[in-house]
Image (cartoon, rainbow, N blue to C red):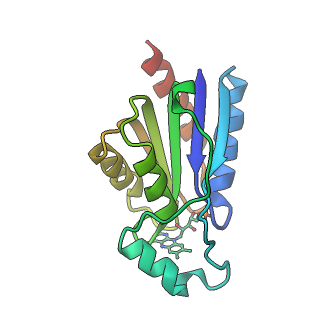
Amino acid sequence: MRILIVYYSKTGRTRRVAKIIKEKLEENGNEVCAHEVKERKDYAKYLLHLNPRLIYDTLIRKRTEIKHIKINLRDYDLLILGSPIWYGTVVPAIRAIIEKFKGIKINTICFTTSDLDRGYSKKFRRLLEGLGYKVIYNFDVVKKEFEKEHILRIKEVIKSSQL
Ligand SMILES: Cc1cc2nc3c(=O)[nH]c(=O)nc-3n(C[C@H](O)[C@H](O)[C@H](O)COP(=O)(O)O)c2cc1C
């Protein structure tokens, strides 16, 4: 299976999760590409919680401008989308990319990374489904935990989606 992982990461946690997913799925003989989405105008790294532009963009649900990435979705059988949670929702750069990919017909898995266990990935899933995505699985990675169960479940979901 050809799998595309698209994620955003500011402090590295979502990047680490994406890397593990990539490695584990490659072990099963899948072809996996991972792309990190970046804003055109970076949010400064220090005092992220107090960054007015970050807060504003997140709260108004802005689809911020992102750096160009060359992806042909037709080359893939499965899309995995990952976002950190800022102020209860997915980050602006992820809003931008999911708008850009809108209308694609491939199976999608989504995940969120967050400090609190609030079922954020379900919200992300609903957002994607509202845009017409076919979401086959969603999961939350809370704090530093990335459980083996996530990978096992992803593998199961992928297998059943191929039947
Ligand atoms: C500005 C900001 C707002 C955040 N808001 C929330 C939140 O509402 N709920 C939550 O559980 N975690 C929140 N977090 C924690 C991040 O979601 C969490 O650390 C995430 O895993 C970071 O991913 P990253 O390291 O890939 O950037 C927030 C972090 C930042 C920087």
The residue located at (53%, 50%) in the rendering is 82
Which residue: 46% across, 67% down?
A: 116
Q: Which residue is more in the foreground, 114 or 100?
A: 100
Image quadrant for the C terminus?
top left
Q: Is residue 3 above or below residue 110?
A: above
User: Percent from the top left, x then y, of residue 155?
Assistant: 55, 27
Q: Residue furthest left?
A: 130
Give the side of residue 144 with respect to residue 115, left or right. right
Residue at image location 43% in from the left, 29% down from the top? 106
Whether residue 161 can be seen here: yes
Would residue 91 be visible to someone looking at this image?
no
109 left or right of 155?
Answer: left
Asked if residue 67 is positioned above or below residue 81 in the image, the reply reads below
Residue shown at 44% from the left, 74% from the top? 57
Q: Percent x, y for residue 62? A: 40, 68
Task: Where is residue 95? Give x, y as percent.
Answer: 43, 58
Q: In this view, does 39 lie above or below 145?
A: below
Give the x, y percent position of residue 41.
61, 71
